Image (spheres, grey):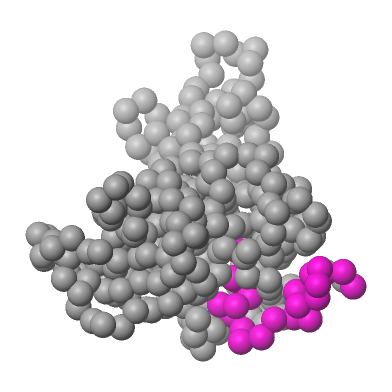
Amino acid sequence: MLPPRYRPLTTTVMPGGFGSVQKVQDTYLDRAVLFKSMQDANNNDQLLNEIQGLSQARSRHVVEIYDVIKSQNGDVQGIIIEYLGGEGYTDFHLKAKSDPHLYVKVLYQIGCALRDLHAAGITHRDLKLENMKNSDSGVLKLFDFGISVSGVDYRTKMNRGTLVYAAPELYIPHAVITTAMDIYAFGVCAWALASDSYPRELLERPPQQSSRAPSIETVLPGLLHPEIVQMIDACLAPDPGLRPSADVLSKVFAHHLTRGMHKGLFSQGQTAVFELSSAKPNVNIQIGSLGTLKAGYDGLIFKVTGVSGHVYINNNAATIGMVLHESCVLTFGSPALGSGRQWVTFTSSQPEVIL
């Protein structure tokens, strides 16, 4: 079945739910890859589904497809996909409490994978710890797209996912598959990464019929920022409309992973006059008798901590607690002064998460 280009590295074939994989050597590119085929040729439609899903996904957190193996008459017999030689995540709960920063970093990577998939119109539909693994370079990647769905308004005839990860709305006959179901599974993944057992509410059929699942705070007490806890808990909302999007999840996690790394600059004309950062967490900007603005950085956001006189941020009167966004203009002086007012610009860096 395999073309001469691929040489089996082992006789062991690892079975999955419907397909099986074998580690082979790509002799052209001199690298180990995986050959995936279906155990039953009648399920080749799932393999085609996986090919379509992987070909549409463009993400560093989704396994790559390298080749499609066809028979002489053109029927798809298997695919060659990226070999992930790094660690898996089924035992990650053993280290979650001792390294909450790494825990959040794992969630961030899963969130990024879902963000990229959902942006391409793909619902993974079988998100679970067994379907994610690290590459040799340590980057988390999702795989197994056999029951993924592209587009909207797809109604399922049967739930072929993993039960504990299945959202409550999947128990409705002919349920419409939505990205919110992936978000629910993400919430279950967050629990599985933190604990070796699930709360009873998630094990009910349908889940969460008696009450909502407890907060992730119960298994990681005091180890996560309240905003992180809120995001994870919201993923498990029984009402899919209350779950955050993958884009929101990835942004929130990224923000916390870069805590203390942001830098803000206040400039007048071409001259930087004040820096706001972890090294300089407070500034006091006074422009003559026009007004005074105090600002602070708490490691996550830049915000106004004090104001007197006439100070405006993007033409809105500055108030204590107002957030200084990535780029804004500060105006000092009453509008009645016209050209007698003075302007200061504020810009902030957006550091990237280092994996």
Q: Which residue occupies the extreme right position in the image?
A: 210
Q: What quarter of the picture does the C terminus occupy? A: bottom left
162 up-or-down from 340: above or below: below
Q: What quarter of the picture does the N terminus occupy? A: bottom left
* Residue 244 placement, left or right of 214: left
Query: Residue placed at 49% from the left, 56% from the top?
Result: 46
* Residue toward you, 120 or 328: 120
Picture coordinates of residue 321, whole percent (x, y) = 67, 47
Picture coordinates of residue 75, whole percent (x, y) = 35, 50
Check if residue 188 falls in the magenta segment: yes
Query: Residue placed at 90% from the left, 73% from the top?
Result: 210
219 up-or-down from 70: above or below: below
Does the rendering let one see residue 317?
yes
Q: Which residues are magenta?
A: 186-210
* Residue 30 placement, left or right of 183: left
* Residue toward you, 76 or 340: 76
Query: Residue placed at 53% from the left, 19% from the top?
Result: 341
Image quadrant in which you'd find residue 331: top right
Q: How many marks?
A: 0
* Residue toward you, 171 or 37: 37
Picture coordinates of residue 64, whole percent (x, y) = 33, 56
Check if residue 209 falls in the magenta segment: yes
* Residue 304 placement, left or right of 27: right
283 up-or-down from 191: above or below: above
Does the rendering let one see residue 139?
no
Picture coordinates of residue 228, whole percent (x, y) = 62, 64
Query: Residue placed at 51% from the left, 88% from the top?
Result: 94
